[in-house]
Image (tube, rainbow, N blue to C red):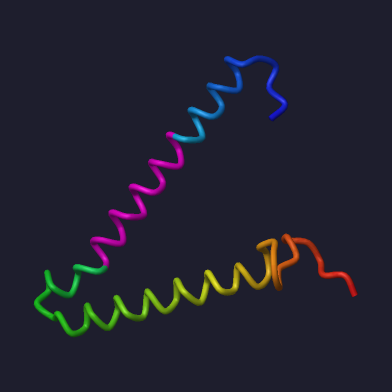
Amino acid sequence: MGAKSFVVARDAYKSWAYRSIGITAIRANAELIRTRLGILLGDGAAAASRRHASKDENRRAAEEYEAYFARGPGGHGGGRMRE
């Protein structure tokens, strides 16, 4: 990690954990609002359509990440592929 002491490393990790949890909570809240928008507006069919489109987009984004940035079969770790 490169920290000068255990205390500095612990505090850096703690800060990272709090930030990650906060970001996840905000994203989850936004997702809840977005997916329930149609129900609030009285258009459940449109809400279901948006929900399915979002799931498809998330799946596509995850597949794209795996294909281009992830290590393992088919991935190259985020750098340029060797020719």
Q: Main secondary structure of the magenta part?
A: helix
Magenta span includes 33: yes
16 relative to 43 in the view: left or right: right
Q: Is residue 10 above or below residue 48?
A: above
Residue most extreme to the front: 73
32 relative to 14 in the view: left or right: left
Q: Residue at x 19, y 68 (%)?
A: 36
Where does the magenta region start and end?
Answer: 18-34
Report x, y in % for residue 26.
34, 49
Choose between 81 and 53: the one closer to the eye: 81
Choose between 54 and 9: the one closer to the eye: 9
Q: Residue at x 60, y 22 (%)?
A: 9
Q: Is residue 26 above or below residue 66?
A: above
Quarter of the image with the N terminus is: top right
Report x, y in % for residue 47.
22, 78
Displayed quadrant of residue 20? top left
Residue most extreme to the right: 83
78 relative to 82 in the view: left or right: left
Q: Is residue 8 above or below residue 21?
A: above
49 relative to 60 in the view: left or right: left
Q: Residue at x 13, y 73 (%)?
A: 39
Magenta span includes 17: no
Report x, y in % for residue 83.
90, 75
Report x, y in % for residue 33.
23, 62
Q: Is residue 29 above or below residue 63?
A: above
Choose between 81 and 22: the one closer to the eye: 81
Q: Residue at x 38, y 74 (%)?
A: 55
